[in-house]
Image (cartoon, rainbow, N blue to C red):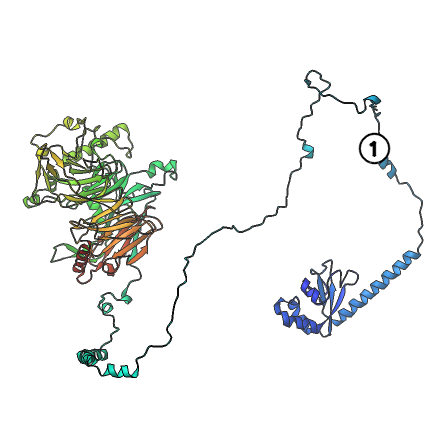
Amino acid sequence: IGHPEIFPLLLTAKTQEIFNCRPDEDVTEENRFKCIKKVDIIKDLKKRAKTSDFYPLKKVILEYPGEELLVVFDPNLQYGQNFYIVASEEAKENFLKSLAAVEEREETEEENIEETLEVHKPWISLGSEKEVEEESLKERDTKIKYKMSRARRKFGAPITFTDKNASDDKDSYAECTAYEDDTFSIKMLERDVGVQMVPKLRETSTQTKWTYPKNASTQYCPRQLSNEAKAESLSSERLKEFLTAVQIRMEIALQQNEIMNVFFDDWKALAEDQEEGKPDVYLKEYQSFTDEQYLKNRTISCVRWHPTIYGIIALSVGEQPSDEEQVNLSNKSLLHQSVILLWSFFDPLCLQLVLKAPEDIYCFQFSPSNPNMIAGGCVDGQVVLWDISKHETKLQITVPVAEETIDSSEGEPIAAAVRVTEVINSRADEAPLVRHCAASSLPYSHSKPATDVHWLPCNSEDKQKGGTSEHRDENNLRLVTCSPDCSILFWDIPSVEHRENFLSQKIKEERRSHMSPDVSDTDEDLNLSWKPLIKINLRERDNSTEYGPTRINLKELQYRYKRSGKAKSLSAVRTPIKESPYTEMSTYSSKNLEVLENISTDFFAGNEDGEVVYSNWKMKTDTNSAKPVSQKHSQKYTLHTEMINTLQQSPFFKDVFLSIGGQKFAIWKEGVTNGPILQSSCSAGRYTAGQWSLTRPGVFFIGRDNGNIDIWDLLKKTHEPSHFQNISKSIITFISPSSASAEQHFLAVSDNLGVLHILEICQALCHPLSNEHANVLDYFKREIKYLK
């Protein structure tokens, strides 16, 4: 401010009290200065250190040459604080002299004012009186005077009130209604409100266990034998016999302690997997697939690998259960396309094929004997077939050329060294759209979503006769599907002619009516029908109990279907059946079915209520009515709390099955009726998917609703997963493993956000341990023994 020797200082109430410089008491506006000894200030700095108010000016105070510092009270905050220090002796003297001069001047002025006499000057008009007269208020109207009087005699007289209608006398009633006057309406712009935050109080009570008092005693002197008793015990024959009996064993024990470590852990030494050899990541991200057009706000319901072409993976697109309010209406036609998408590892940005479906696909499977045939189950219960044989070359082009070696044990080609080559044929930007070549008739399909589909193996007799695939398709039961409508359906494969007619008729109908490809047409309108051959109803006759299967697992079934010599007309096929064509188990023509010998008709099924049913679907003849009836379901187990989402047979043990549903999983063995041989405890979250390992008998993978993958190794732990790894932020919807080669194994994991993760499995989870198959089998036998 122009005074470098003045330093503003903030003194708190405590400091003011210590140095006697309190405002309005020790210092005032008239007497504002206070001299404080430098020694006292230094003591305060040493005592309170940084908390002292003089600490910011510590250097100035220590360098001050004088013994007393001048502290001046600044009530008007001229220098920014309530006090300031004068840091030089010269400024201090000048300041004191100026104060003394000011005081003398004030005293002189007061004396002069007292001596000066007041002199009154005459008033001179300058015209202001006219303005005052114009602004003054003057009364112009004559005032009205009212006089109210009353007779003296009426003072204090009684008064009687009576009822009277106000409308009878207009002058005696005047209504003054209330109204809002804008002149006096004041808008509140600011208001002071006090708010006090207090913690919530909650009363709780607890009861501790009361322990009643007990009498206790303590022995503090040892009980010792007397010298006579010690001599008698040492000289007794019983002691001599005991020492003679244990002498040899004692010598052997002492020798063993010298030559071996008794604290050595033999079980740890026998362990094959060393702790230092554990990998940090068991599932490594290899690739991920998603598509903005088909998978935005959609989920992935099923994932399958191509059986023969390396790197080709297919997935079905479904509707998210909670997306009804989130779907934009303008993009509804685009988001609701029902398709199966085929991707390739070597071209992850482009789709290879898009298989159109009449409705969303819940599950699908490649045919193991003819991978160009794909069967799928729709959410409306229809069963759909696709034939991608025309696009097989396109799928093979995307796969790099590989040098192949032949395994002598299996005779199958194994990729030894892969070298990528350039693709000569240019691909189109958009993937080809493949329509389904056959679809089941709605009246004879499932009434609820087809939740599981399986291909049945081909007849071995056809292979020996060298029949073509088309011939085998026409003569065999090839498909089995299930649904929560309590039905299991067995299907044959339509002939090539039937499939071509179906496809051509559908294309003609779409062109004729300008129908959108997304809109499906009924088979009856096309004069084509595909119906199941056998239907099994999972219902109990006695108590009408229904079992709605969501997953099934059957043994190998081989049925030969013999068509009659004369082909049926299309009109005959199109004729609907008025009554239900099925009872407990029914066929369209039981004479045309020839049952092959030595087959198993037992099956496992998991339903919506979390029950696992083991039953036999073979018909038996009733002794009373001589009619074929279905057998009663042999076993039913209520273990899972929610719908069964996985029921899979072990690839190493044909009679061992894995079931997953809700918060539990269980392992079952066919023929064991006491329950599962292994069941997990209730987990914190839900299990949503699962699969056995293809290379290790004791390993399987389970997906959870928190996006984790649990890896279970039965040879390490059976009460908790051996490892777990987070894959996604959403629910895991499906898991599908694949063995690309002896050294490379993949795990396809899909989530509810429409993303497919391809994970590479580490070597520790791929290569089986020595005698792992026998050890896992021994473990199952021990668990079965415990159940019995």
Q: Is residue 219 left or right of residue 587?
A: right
Residue 282 placed where, x, y %?
28, 59
Could you tell me if residue 537 is visible in this image?
yes
Q: Position of residue 390 (x, y in %)?
A: 19, 41
User: 380 or 517, which lies in front?
Assistant: 380
Q: How many marks on residues?
A: 1
Identify which residue, 212 or 63, lies in the foreground: 212
In the picture provided, is 120 more to the left or to the right than 306?
right
Dot 1 falls on a residue whose secondary structure is loop
Residue located at (15% from left, 28% from top): 573
Residue nearest the observer in this picture, 558 or 666: 666
**Camera-side residue of 782 and 451:** 782
User: Is residue 10 something that shows in the picture?
Assistant: no
Residue beneath the point at 62% across and 70% down: 49
Q: Residue 14's quadrant in the figure?
A: bottom right
Check the picture and name the quadrant holding the N terminus.
bottom right
Q: Residues within 10 Å of mark 1 (few under 14, many from 20)?
A: few
Type of the residue with mark 1: Leu
Q: Which residue is mark 1?
A: 137
